[in-house]
Amino acid sequence: MSSFVEIPQPSRFRMGELFKDNNFTVPMYQRNYDWESDQIVDFWDDLVDLVEGNRNSHFFGQIVTFKNEDGRQEIIDGQQRLTTSPIFMAVIKDIATKMYQDNFAKDISLSDLDRGDKLRDIRNAVKKLIRGDHEGDQASLVVEQRSANNGELEDYFYALTHKASEALNETSKVAPIKKMRSTYTTIHKWIENDLKLKKTLGERIDRLDNIFNSFYDKFYIVMISAPSRIDAFTIFETLNSRGKDLEVSDIIKNHLMSLLNSDMDSANTQWQRIASAFNGDSHKISRFIRTYWAASHKVIQESKLYRAISQQITNSNDATVFLKDLDALVEIYTVLDSPVSPKSHYEFFKNKFITQHLDILNRMHVMLYYPIVMAMYYRGYHEDDILKAVNKILSVFVRHRTINNEGTNVLESGFSEVAQHIWNVDLNGIDDIINELNDKLLKSDDSIKANFSALSKEGGLKGPKKWTLVYLLSEIYSYLYDDFADNNLYTKVFDQDNYKLVHISSDDSLGDYKDYIGNWTILEKRLATSAEEDSSKLVDALNQSELKANNELFKSVEFGGWDPDQIRERQTDFAQNVVNQIW
């Protein structure tokens, strides 16, 4: 943001003082908990350094807050560290409680009294910091207000820090819940393993006490409490606009909320609806926003996305339209990302040929075209037109990338430009879209014939390499031999996955020709298994195949074997007579 804000004098707190003297809230408009294993490793390593006496203190980072009307400190920046802290302290409390129950609860002698008291002291000290055990007693940290998502995150975080035995059985797929649970279990495992290195119970209790007190007394944070929420937002953006530690979507969200401060609840409801489509995964949200921007404005690197958006979205009206667009497009984006699962995605388009072609693109791991389909959907194009566009996109991609093996930068920028022309209504209907794709991006017949004649593909058992080669061969067989009549190519080849890629010859003497397209075929899996176990059975398998293409191959390999000349001849025939007719 451009406005100047005088940053308040920061305050330094040890972690014990921080939680003793403040009540914090991770507000509903903030990003979700997102610590990965690397951050947890760093946290633990820093703590162990203190425990071992290698350092006297550790700076745990900065936080930016705003004291709201309820008297709680809304966390504008630093929620990852503050959310991890009660999780860590809850682990300490739970381990201390279990050690006490296992060793002292039933019978404690005078000689063991001090040790038992130390475990109780650890447990009680954590409870005083976490708080919220009793009615009317507020927890020191509340994660997300109940109105944001019906309290799922708030309830889970409370359960994890107050009654972990229940929370750890939670099977939610929501990303922040999974990561909170992972943080707890990881820290719990590390502390237990650390304690096992001590020989006696007394040493283990002292070690646990040292671990807790090192965090309580020697971790410290610098806290900036802003005079208003707007000021807090501005400080946050100033400190984080380079996006090194945050996902781009988190900074963009903060920017939108600062512009929509007067209607934050409504804006946050929209954002949460968008985020829920990605289970709160900030990286996926960033990718979605980047695709939307490529469709409506310009394709841009993710690292520069926030800067571009903040320069364009400068007032509440802009922010409202931006959120409305995202809300309108999130469903079609998730369909493009996973066309056949769940069932609602499979049923999104009435025309199943669209779904089938999108699934083929998805299996080939093609995503660059998303902006075009999103722009057509946004402008209300008929499904018949969307199907025509997707067919042309397939042709463009196969020619450019699969056959000519050219880079993706030209395709990404080209698809984005076409999408922007659709978005801005510069193209009048599907014919204009097809013509622009042809003019800007479709490689010539001569180039694809030349490149296909020497095309080589590795194949594979799964993934994009497999599906790309399977797609090429099945389309060629369908066109040349009518092998998949009645539009059943997708059903048999992709949906039912009936076929397996097989080398016609696996002789090492073929050299580079082994992976030429002319040396590949697709064979029914029941036949492919026996042929792979015994290469002499391949000829019979080709003859038994239901595919006419394989029956023709049988005639070629039945007596004379298979050599580079035959591979080149077969591939050249494909290149000259088939490829430009399909793509």
Image (cartoon, rainbow, N blue to C red):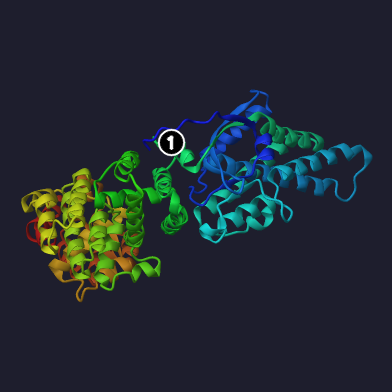
Query: Would residue 428 appear left or right of 328 to someone viewing this image?
Result: left
Q: Is residue 163 above or below residue 549?
A: above
Give residue 155's position: percent from left, percent from top: 61, 57
Tell me: 455 left or right of 187.
left
Report the residue at 27% width, 59% height from top: 374
Q: Is residue 179 above or below residue 390?
A: above
Q: Is residue 114 above or below residue 145?
A: above
Looking at the image, which residue sits at the far bottom?
Answer: 486
Q: Where does the C terminus fall, quadrant-wise? A: bottom left
Query: Horizontal and vertical percent for residue 60?
Result: 58, 32
Residue 50 location, quadrant: top right
The percent position of residue 36, horizontal first and vertical second, equals 51, 43
| Callout count | 1
Q: Quadrant of residue 582?
A: bottom left
Which residue lies most toward the right here?
A: 110
Q: Nearer the viewer, residue 487 or 563?
A: 487
- Quick one: 203 or 457, which is closer to the camera? 203
Residue at 68%, 26% in the rendered image: 52
Q: Quadrant of the N terminus?
A: top left
Closer to the camera in the image, 363 or 233 = 233
For label 1, the crowd category at 10 Å Cα-Cα, with few meaning under 14, some 14 to 19 and many 20 or more, is some
Q: Which residue is mark 1?
A: 240
Secondary structure at numbered mark 1 = helix
Q: Residue drawn at (46%, 35%), measured in percent from left and top? A: 235
Question: Is residue 496 visible in the rendered structure shown here?
Answer: no
Residue 292's x, y, as percent? 30, 52
The reply, left or right, for residue 196 in relation to residue 461 is right
User: Quick check: 479 above or below 229?
Assistant: below
At x 18% / y 62%, what residue is drawn? 389
Whether residue 63 is visible, yes or no, is: yes
Three-letter code for the amino acid on which mark 1 is drawn = Asn
